[in-house]
Every structure is written in C-alpha cells, then in structure tokens.
C-alpha cells in the first residue's frame, strides 16, 4: 500500500487531469471501411511522415476540428495478404504505439460489432460500452481465469450517454468472427450485448498506460439470429458504417470544449 501522502498526491493529479479541457483525442478503428467515413467527416489528412516504426502497415490520419486535435489510427493492410489487420494483436500494438507517440487525453475505439437479439440489439444500433472482457482466453486455473477474462470498466460518460441517447451495453472480445459453443458460454458469462475483435485489447493497453477510453460499437450482424454471421456482416457493413460515422461525429461534437469530468 502506498504511503498516505503519496496516494493523496496521485488522487489530486487524477482530479486535475479530469478538470483540464480535452485537447487531443485518439480514434482507434480496425478496418479501412470503418475509418474512411470518419476521416472524410473531419477532413483528416494522412500522415506522410509517420510516427510509427518503419515498415509497419499502420496508418495515421490527423487534423484539427473545433478545439480538438484528432488523430485516427488503423492497423492498415496485412503486408502478405492485403486484408485489414483485424484482431486483438494488431489493435493492441497500434494503440500502444499511438499512445506513446501522440499522448492523447482520451481514446475512442469505434467499430462494428455483432449483437445479440436476446439482449435487445438490432442491426444499426449504436452502443456506448460500459464494460469490456475477453471470451476466448480460457485459463482454468484460479486467478489466471480472471486474468484471461480481463474484465475492465470503460471510462464513465453518463452525460454523453444521456445527451446522445445511445444504448448502453457490455462488450465481449475475441479473435474469431464466428462463435464456438465455448465462446458462447463465455460471452453469456460476460453478460455481453455486443461482441467484437478489438475492444478488450484496446482497453487493456489504455488501462496499462492510464489513458481514459470509451467504446462505440455499431451492430452489423445478429449473432444469435438466423443468418450466417459472415454473410450478414458483409451485407450490412456499408449501411452500419454510416450509422457509426454519425455516432462518432456526435460524440466528438459533445466532447469539444469539455473536460473529462463533464463527460
């Protein structure tokens, strides 16, 4: 346990940070299709002198909107196969590198997700996530099991939730688009309304480096519905990305001119 004075000093620093106007936000997005509408919305420019290590495919766009410095990063295309570098490993790496290079005040992880109709999710619903956890890191050893789930609360934004009338729900993350019976049991245990392939990894890095993070997820497919997940995801991706873009724009507008404690 820290000495009383040291703990009090740390608490005061956190309070001061929460009262400072937000000036820099980092938007982390997994896919180019999801990223480009946001890039165009805020007229962001691609970084031609990258802050990332030489040779990595990660992409950064940046610009100023109102009083905010906006950086948007996505992991780019796989160098061998040319597809979006989705999943937890790419998300955690690019988030870590971006925090180190850009020192944001706040992270927004925005993206599409599968939703569960049993929890009230519908196609194009946009959720502001309250909690995140993993569903495919099963380690059946005491305490390691909790580490595997990696449950984390997202940064609390009650005013944002109320003002924009977004839905709230818990997010479960895994590295597969489909859902095995073991994953399903873990997702139920996580009480998740939506599932994705990046969120909990971004949350882990944000927590590690003590940067507040919020998560905005738009539903492309109903995991417990009648249609094959991959088919429904591709069918709805464009339309749902438009809903995601609108929600991100509203969130950024709400954040502008505020400090963390006002969210």
Image: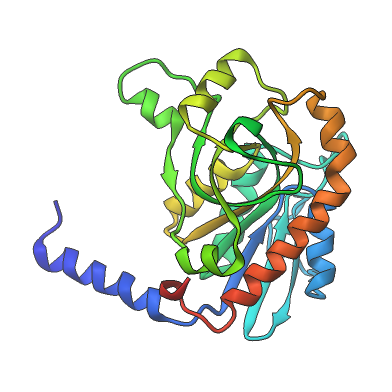
Residue 66: x and y in percent read 68, 85
Q: Which quadrant of the figure has residue 237?
A: top right
The answer to whether residue 179 is above or below residue 200 is above
Q: Residue at x 82, y 75 (%)?
A: 43
Count of marks, rendered view: 0
Q: Residue at x 46, y 64 (%)?
A: 158
Q: Which quadrant of the figure has residue 254?
A: bottom right
Residue 213: x and y in percent read 51, 58
Residue 120: x and y in percent read 62, 39
Colour scheme: rainbow
Q: Residue furthest left?
A: 4
Which residue occupies the foreground of this view, 222 or 78?
Answer: 222
User: Would residue 12 appear left or right of 255 to someone viewing this image?
Assistant: left
Which residue occupies the foreground of this view, 24 or 98?
Answer: 24
Which residue occupies the foreground of this view, 166 or 30?
Answer: 166
The answer to whether residue 122 is above or below residue 135 is below
User: Would residue 253 appear left or right of 134 to someone viewing this image?
Assistant: right
Residue 246: x and y in percent read 75, 64
Residue 38 visible? The answer is: yes
The answer to whether residue 179 is above or below residue 172 is above
Q: Residue at x 57, y 75 (%)?
A: 255
């Amino acid at each position: 346990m820290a000495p009383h004075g040291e703990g009090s000093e740390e608490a005061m620093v956190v309070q001061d940070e929460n009262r400072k106007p937000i000036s820099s936000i980092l938007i982390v997005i997994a896919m180019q299709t999801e990223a480009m509408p946001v890039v165009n919305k805020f007229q962001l420019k691609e970084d031609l002198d990258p802050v990332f290590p030489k040779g990595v495919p990660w992409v950064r766009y940046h610009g100023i909107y109102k009083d905010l410095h906006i950086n948007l990063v996505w992991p780019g295309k796989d160098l061998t196969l040319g597809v979006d570098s989705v999943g937890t490993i790419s998300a955690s790496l690019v988030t870590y590198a971006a925090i180190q290079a850009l020192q944001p005040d706040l992270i927004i992880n925005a993206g599409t997700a599968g939703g569960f109709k049993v929890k009230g999710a519908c196609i194009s619903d946009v959720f502001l996530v309250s909690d995140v956890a993993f569903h495919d890191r099963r380690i059946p050893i005491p305490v390691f099991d909790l580490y595997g789930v990696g449950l984390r609360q997202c940064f609390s934004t009650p005013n944002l939730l109320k003002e924009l009338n977004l839905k709230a729900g818990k997010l479960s993350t895994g590295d597969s688009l489909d859902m095995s019976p073991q994953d399903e049991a873990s997702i139920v245990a996580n009480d998740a309304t939506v599932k994705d392939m990046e969120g909990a990894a971004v949350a882990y890095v944000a927590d590690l480096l003590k940067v507040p993070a919020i998560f905005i997820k738009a539903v492309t497919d109903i995991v417990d519905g009648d249609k094959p997940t991959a088919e429904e995801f591709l069918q709805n991706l464009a339309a749902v990305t438009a809903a995601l873009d609108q929600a991100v724009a509203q969130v950024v507008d709400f954040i502008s001119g505020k400090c963390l404690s006002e969210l």
